[in-house]
Amino acid sequence: MHASRQSQPLSYDLRLPDEAQAHALRLLDASREVVNAALLALWPQLDEFLTEREQPAWKQVTTLMDSPDPYGNRQWRCEAETAGRILRAQASRKQVFLAVCPILSDGFIHPKDERHPAGKNRQAIKEAVTALQRDREEDESAFVSMHNVLEQACNCFLRLGSFPRTYEEMQPMPLLKTGLLTYAGDDGPQLGQSYRLALDLDAGTAALRFRFPDEEGNWQWLRQPVVLTLPACVLDRLKQGEELAPTLREHMLPDGSRLAVLDLVVQVSKAKLPAWETTGRVLGFDWGVHTLITAVALDSQQGQIGRPFFLNTGGLEGKQARTRREIDRLKAARDQLPPNDPKRLWHEREIARCWRKYEARNRELAHLAANVLLLLAAVYDCQLIAGESLTTLKSTGRGRGVRGRWHNWRNNATIRGEIWHILRYKCHLAGIRLRAEKPDKTSHSCPRCGKPARTLRSPRSEHQRKAVKWGRWLSCSACRYNADRDVAAAINIARLGMTFVMHLQATGKAQAFRVTDESVKPAPYMAAGAVLLLPPHVPWDRLIHAGKIYLNGWRRCVALRTSYPTPILLRLCG
């Protein structure tokens, strides 16, 4: 579900009570079989879903086929909506494949040699996608999709020895492995023929009834509605927005057991954005070399406001690295077992448990990074957040060995794309503009004089003689400017954002700039204005203080809340 220009959908998952779990799981199992049967039947007609997007997905599916297992018209419409959304997503991905198919060549593959197996040439992939998207008017997520599809084609080459000629040759059929059923095809919460949902905002509860098959396969309604307690945040959203059709889905626990949860979807209005004429401050952030994010605020005179902020995730990186090593160890042990060995099932469960823990940490980190940027924008009264473009998602040549590998993990598409996605929708709710700036020479240009600068390993005297491409310290020989390279890049990105604002205010036209353009004014060396007084950062192992969890250095003045309960957060991060 996508956001419109004026609204933003938000989803909140509610666990069904124990007395409804068995009925809901049987419903999801039956619906999964129907959805998969529809996907099998319509997969050869994937091109039919390339263009038609105005009408609901279930209408497109029902015109092409009837239910493979009919047990209710509205039930089939809900299952057709689920299958149609999957096919539309795959059709969009096929369009991306058709765009990158003409440029597929052996240059994207590193051939096998005596020391290394065959692999992907990530630098060539990045350059090809950048050149392909240069003339396209698309958002930053389009680059991620194109990059992902091109890498999938390269994986197909490494597996089969040739590039795929069609999308269906590369992409396996997207069959559901867990239950998923959206009720968007029904007639609404009051008149629905597959579900009924009654909200009591005064009592803070929701009463749910749904049709399900019993153990003999006979379909019936739930006799008594199950009562769900609505959290306070959901109640606030429901009072402000509009209730949309919910989704019933299956959630797999680490021990292999299953749970049924109801995703309650609320559509809220986006906050009103400030006028460009009143935009006077910009918060710029850079994907760091030794920190996840570095942020700096500038005013309309390109003066730095306050001190730079570093979001250091070193402790979490170590936990993620250990989890990935455990996954590799489990995979190696699994592959040594015979195909019918019962121990393989245990290894599969452990691998799935580790991946769930890994992905949960990534989501938590993405929410934390987005919340920090929004908090800094509010503290410094910034109306625009300018970030480094997602075209630098893949890091190449930034270190060797285990340490460099996990620096690359932090800079990869997964975590950066997740941060950008979460930050974008949260900016819609907070009423703050978000803009992507091209990172051309932002980390190798002096923010004070604008001339090219060299990067060093450190500011130490023994490292002053030799420049390194991805050094963490920037030194300008023209004006003697010295600073952390991430800080210089964040200042340059903020300068680009402020130049965009000033040009738009003066001419009424939007124009992107490069950091080497003469119209991009230099930033003063010293910070101007009030400095945000924060205590120094503390290590990750000292985050817990007096039974509470705080962000590094912000024990007393501010606490960032999370969607996870405290025990779950402690288990994920510990």
Image (cartoon, helix red, strand yellow):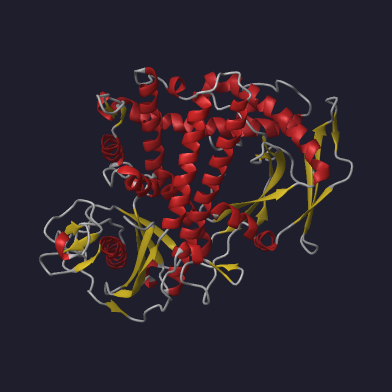
Give the residue furthest to the bottom: 530
User: 121 or 271: nearer the eye?
Assistant: 121
Horizontal side of 207 relative to 536 (left or right) equals right
Residue 155 picture quarter: top left
**Residue located at (26% from left, 43% from top):** 397
User: Where does residue 249 sit, x and y in percent of width and height?
Assistant: 68, 39
Q: Say above or below: 68 vs 236.
A: above
User: Where does residue 521 sit, x and y in percent of width and height?
Assistant: 21, 68
**Residue located at (45% from left, 57% from top):** 315
User: 274 or 258: nearer the eye?
Assistant: 258
Q: Say above or below: 40 vs 312.
A: above
Give the residue furthest to the right: 223
Is residue 74 something that shows in the picture? no
User: Where does residue 567 sit, x and y in percent of width and height?
Assistant: 64, 57
User: 554 or 268: nearer the eye?
Assistant: 554
Is residue 258 something that shows in the picture? yes
**Residue located at (37% from left, 57% from top):** 435
Horizontal side of 300 relative to 71 (left or right) equals left
**Residue located at (15% from left, 55% from top):** 467
